[in-house]
Image (cartoon, rainbow, N blue to C red):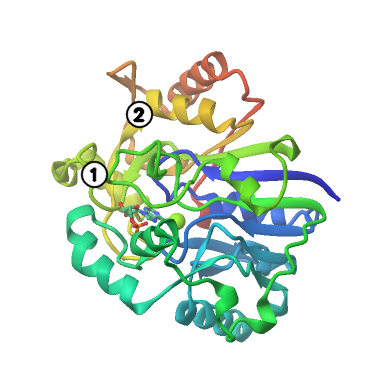
């Protein structure tokens, strides 16, 4: 029986330091499973274990803490990159026999990657990992699944979940196929309700941990994030101090002031109960404190003043919010 499921999700456009939250929760020893419910190796999760930095793209972060780590039926799996990740984890001494893949997850083929590179990479600024074409074959019902491959035999998940489950989101709220700025979105459901595809009822969701940053960033194309943002001196400084480069693509991310209207919407629709707003140190170092709210840009004198205002607005506009945390850059913890 499943006792409860906690979900970690991104409240922006990915890169909100979800890995840090997942790590902290997973290291508590509370959970029996850590699971991914969507996406593939378009994601890039950075995790710090005992001061050491590790990167994964597909395998859930539970693996760093000796917890069963499940790649769910809603995920897409690149065979080569999966086995490279297994090798990387083995090399660093992690127990990869705990990695499990749903037999129903779909497989990303070389042909998907080619289609992505040729048709979508430039037009949409995708990660060129074959994600969109793989999900479109899944929807067309012409895809191939993990169960059709012999390679995965020792990793096949028996589709049982028990006890306490932690679900690790990929990408973010505004990259969701339905909610994002279509077609500048990813091809999966990034919202917490989709975690139920792992095999539990919505009522089992206990807490939703929403990850956000104190400023917005966007990797990939999006008319809401014009390229001219890259020329703004204050935003450029924030991007440099915050090391805003893609884990998966190495691309420089576009930086903008936090859009609080969008954040509030994401909190309320995702059902976030605990929000972690990170990278406070970056704004402090940059010495500029601004956010958009009700379509106006507000300017504050200090990080303390900005945090106080953020806290008050989120508390008053988000009924489901229970806890609001502010934190620093992942490498500072
Ligand atoms: P795709 O998921 O590769 O098809 O890319 C679609 C859009 O989602 C592009 O704008 C990507 O930059 C963005 N995207 C996908 N995965 C991530 C991620 O993990 N972090 C940030 N952006 C992402
Ligand atoms: Mg990421």
Q: Secondary structure at mark 1?
A: loop
Q: Is mark 2 within 8 Å of ligand 1?
A: no
Closer-to-camera residue (79/250)? 79
> Residue 70 location in percent, x, y?
66, 64
**In this image, 318 relative to 279: left or right?**
right
Q: Secondary structure at mark 2?
A: strand
Task: Find disc 1 in the rendering and name its residue.
Answer: 222
> Residue 332 location in percent, x, y?
53, 54
> Residue 169 location in percent, x, y?
55, 50
Sequence-first tag of 2 and 1? 1
Residue neighbourhood size for the residue with mark 1, other residues' Cα within 10 Å, grouped as few (<14), some (14–19), many (≥20): some
Q: Are marks 2 and 1 in contact (CB under 8 Å)?
A: no
Residue neighbourhood size for the residue with mark 2, other residues' Cα within 10 Å, grouped as few (<14), some (14–19), many (≥20): many
Quarter of the rendering containing residue 216: top left
Q: Is residue 223 visible?
A: yes
Q: Is residue 333 visible?
A: no
Residue at the image point whose x is 62% and y is 50% from the top: 197
Closer-to-camera residue (314/112)? 112
Which disc number belongs to residue 180? none
Which disc number belongs to residue 259? 2
Residue 248 sits above or below residue 20 on the image: below
């Amino acid at each position: 029986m499943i006792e409860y499921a906690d979900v970690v999700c991104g409240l922006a456009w990915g890169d909100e330091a979800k890995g840090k939250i997942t790590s902290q929760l997973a290291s508590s020893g509370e959970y029996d499973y850590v699971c991914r419910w969507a996406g593939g190796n378009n994601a890039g999760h950075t995790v710090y274990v005992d001061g050491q930095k590790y990167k994964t793209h597909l395998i859930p972060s539970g693996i760093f803490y000796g917890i069963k780590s499940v790649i769910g039926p809603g995920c897409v799996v690149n065979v080569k990159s999966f086995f490279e990740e297994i090798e990387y984890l083995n090399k660093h001494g992690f127990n990869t026999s705990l990695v499990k893949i749903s037999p129903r997850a779909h497989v990303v083929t070389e042909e998907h990657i080619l289609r992505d590179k040729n048709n979508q990479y430039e037009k949409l600024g995708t990660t060129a990992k074959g994600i969109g074409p793989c999900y479109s074959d899944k929807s067309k019902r012409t895809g191939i699944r993990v169960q059709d491959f012999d390679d995965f035999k020792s990793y096949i998940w028996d589709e049982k979940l028990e006890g306490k489950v932690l679900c690790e989101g990929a990408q973010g709220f505004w990259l969701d196929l339905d909610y994002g700025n279509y077609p500048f979105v990813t091809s999966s459901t990034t919202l917490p309700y989709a975690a139920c595809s792992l095999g539990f009822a919505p009522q089992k969701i206990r807490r939703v941990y929403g990850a956000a940053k104190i400023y917005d960033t966007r990797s990939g194309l999006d008319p809401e994030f014009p390229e001219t943002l890259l020329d703004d001196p204050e935003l450029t400084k924030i991007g440099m101090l915050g090391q805003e480069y893609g884990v998966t693509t190495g691309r420089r991310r576009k930086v903008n002031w936090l859009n609080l209207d969008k954040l509030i919407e994401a909190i309320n629709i995702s059902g976030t109960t605990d929000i972690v707003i990170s990278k406070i140190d970056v704004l402090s170092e940059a010495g500029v404190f601004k956010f958009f709210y009700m379509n106006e840009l507000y300017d504050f004198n200090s990080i303390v003043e900005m945090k106080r205002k953020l806290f008050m607005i989120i508390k008053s506009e988000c009924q489901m919010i229970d806890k609001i945390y502010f934190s620093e850059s992942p490498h500072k913890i």
